[in-house]
Image (cartoon, rainbow, N blue to C red):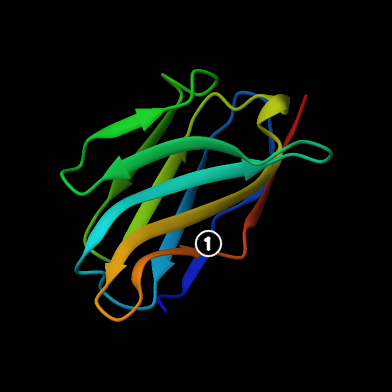
Amino acid sequence: QVQLVESGGGLVQAGESLRLSCAASEIIFSLNDMRWYRQAPGKQRELVATIISNNSTMYADSVKGRFTISRDNAKNTYLQMNSLKPEDTAIYYCRAHYWDRTTGWVDSWGQGTQVTVSS
């Protein structure tokens, strides 16, 4: 199974920016989509952004206009986060949805990276 590793989290002040990276252990040839989720303490995991195989993107209303998801090749996905707010504080996870010819559709998750925004 493909392994995902997130990086780029940290502590910033409100209004600042961060860029999260998600590195896959191998090229995912049958990728359907990559997603960024986040989970704040005491809350359910929330879908933040999606990029599908044709590079179309979708965003949660709460981040639209501030966050941008992108891919530079078949292994790396990014989440550029601008104008950060304290309510963006959460652990951010990337997830790959792809076809494996042995097991079928697969969801692979990273371990998460902490983003903390102070007011």
Instruction: Check the picture and name the quadrant holding the N terminus.
Output: bottom left
Name the side, left or right, on which 49 lies relative to 45: left
Residue drawn 26% across and 69% down? 28
Amino acid type indicated by mark 1? Glu
Q: State whether residue 26 is above or below residue 91.
A: below
Residue 83 lies, in percent from the top left, at: 54, 23
Residue 114 lies, in percent from the top left, at: 68, 51
Residue drawn 54% across and 64% down? 110
Q: In which quarter of the image is residue 88?
A: top right
Residue neighbourhood size for the residue with mark 1, other residues' Cα within 10 Å, grouped as few (<14), some (14–19), many (≥20) = many
Which residue lies under the disc numbered 1? 6
Residue extending furthest left? Answer: 54
Q: Mark yes or no: residue 11 visible.
A: no
Q: Mark yes or no: residue 80 visible.
A: yes
Residue drawn 77% across and 36% down? 43
Towards the viewer: 72 or 38: 38
Towards the viewer: 104 or 12: 104
Residue 64 lies, in percent from the top left, at: 44, 20
Name the side, left or right, on which 59 lies relative to 76: right
Residue drawn 43% across and 36% down? 49
Instruction: Check the picture and name the quadrant holding the C terminus.
Output: top right
Q: State whether residue 46 is above or below residue 92.
A: above
Classify mark 1: helix, strand or loop.
Answer: strand
Residue 21 lies, in percent from the top left, at: 45, 56
Name the side, left or right, on which 15 lies relative to 27: right
Q: Quadrant of residue 111?
A: bottom right
